[in-house]
Image: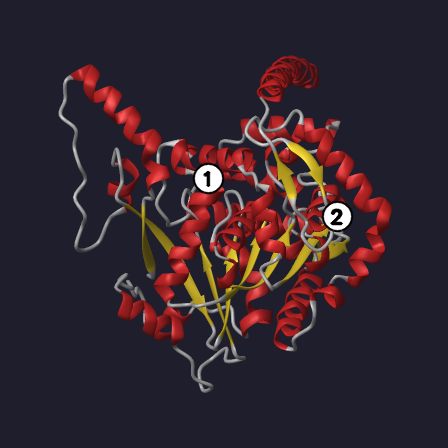
Amino acid sequence: MPFCYVPAFTDDAIGIAKEAGRNNEKTGIAKKHVPEEQGEVTSDTVARSPVPTEFKLFYRLYGHGDTKVLLIMGLAGTHHAWAPQLEALCGTDVANDEEQEKDNMVSSNAEEGENEGRRSTSAQVGSCGRQCCAYDNRGVGQSSIPRRREAYSTTSMARDALALMDHLRWAKAHVFGHSMGGMIACKLAAMAPTRIASLAIISSSAGGYACIPKWSLRILAIAYRLLRAKTPEARAAVDLDTHYTSLYLDAVAEAGETRRAVLYKEYVQAITASGMQERHGQDGHMHACWTHFLTGEEWHAICSGAFLVSVIHGNGDIICPIERGMDIAKRLGEVAKFVDLPGGHFITRECQVEVNDCLLRLIMAVESGVAALEWSQTTRQMLGPEGWSQSRQNAEASASCWWPQFRSQSLTYGKTNLLCEVESAELRQRTRFSNLTVCLFILLGSLALKILLDVILVNAS
């Protein structure tokens, strides 16, 4: 099995080190340093080390070619979730290590990573000139699962992705991210724009309070069921309602069965095989989404990175409403094309053909040298001046109550798309008050909802 070992970056371990230091001082125990392993670092060691020296990322390579595609999945998703895209992108959904040899553990030394990342022959299966890499983010699947929330952020996970590209000796890649993976992809693009051939942001948002879906009875019921889901069967039932639209689930698929029935069996089998995501990983992923934020300089780095961007979103997405995707497209100005599809959060499967077509068009546009203004023309016409103005007003209004460390004074959408930021003690104080008010409101609302739903369930039984 192929693994990449990435360092536990300093900012990942700050909170862990401080807490470990406090505990050691209280108990009088000497600090323990985890030595670097020359051989294999087990997930047990990485997950339970007070200050881990490195994390283990599980990845799979598909197809062969000089064009590289990095696929980043979202919250609680493993590399398997990219299966609907693999055959269209690289000609096969069978991993290279499964083709060549079973149980292949790839070391992390540079030479072997280089050989594997660059391997390309026209005679091999799945040879269409493109090679895809799909991997498990930290906190899920076969990758390491740190126990502390401080180890999870979109910044640290973007560094994981960059380390994986270095391991494979990929100088540049098309980076496609879904949901939280889109946030990670944006961070990666802002962090290393010269390593990005193109960027696709699918069913994603700007993070923070933008992660909160539109309130409705359906959303409240789903949230309650998700909290109570302790078995693969219960989790599968909730996932279906969050991932797809009712129209898609209720359609007849095979042998007279609805898609809901077919997908339910598949989800239960997959969750049972991989196991329920550990609480540390789930909490960490949610923490990463809540704390995700791009500064004006980072948005500007993406816009001026000389690569094309596709923002793909489902208009039936109840987890991440389509307005979230439109906001990202507006922020990216003249380099982004916005694609609206009739599907839910997992449009990568519900609208498989359409999403694959969008991704292939993006790759071909880069290869044919399409200019950014030409690429984003239809989106700029669709949004129009009113769309830019409304987005500007929304961003300015949200700046007074979202993030203490960043305050929006002015927004300019266009060639630079620069979000000017100023710090203000008065605004920070007002933000703290606003955040406390929102948290209190959410807490009281959650308690009231729990009581209401308990009463409904009792009456129903």
Q: Nearer the viewer, residue 337 or 4?
A: 337
Task: Determine the secondary structure under disc 2.
Answer: helix
Quadrant for residue 23, please give it: top left
The three-letter amino acid code for the residue at tag 2 is Asp
Q: How many numbered discs sit on the rendered protein?
A: 2
Q: Which mark is residue 236?
A: none
Q: Residue at x 40, y 51 (%)?
A: 160
Q: Nearer the viewer, residue 417 or 252?
A: 417
Quadrant for residue 320, please give it: top right
Residue 398 drawn at (x, y percent): 69, 30
Q: Is residue 201 above or below residue 35?
A: below
* 32 sits left or right of 217 in the view: left
The residue tagged 2 is: 250
- Label 1 crowd (10 A; few <14 / some 14-19 / many >=20): many
The residue tagged 1 is: 153
Residue 96 drawn at (x, y percent): 41, 71
Q: For residue 409, say whether it is visible.
A: yes
- Label 2 crowd (10 A; few <14 / some 14-19 / many >=20): few
Q: Residue at x 59, y 59 (%)?
A: 199
Q: Is residue 12 above or below residue 451?
A: below
Q: For residue 214, say whether it is visible.
A: no
Quadrant for residue 51, please give it: top left
Q: Quadrant of the C terminus?
A: top right
The three-letter amino acid code for the residue at tag 1 is Ser
* 179 sits left or right of 70 in the view: right
Residue 107 drawn at (x, y percent): 26, 62
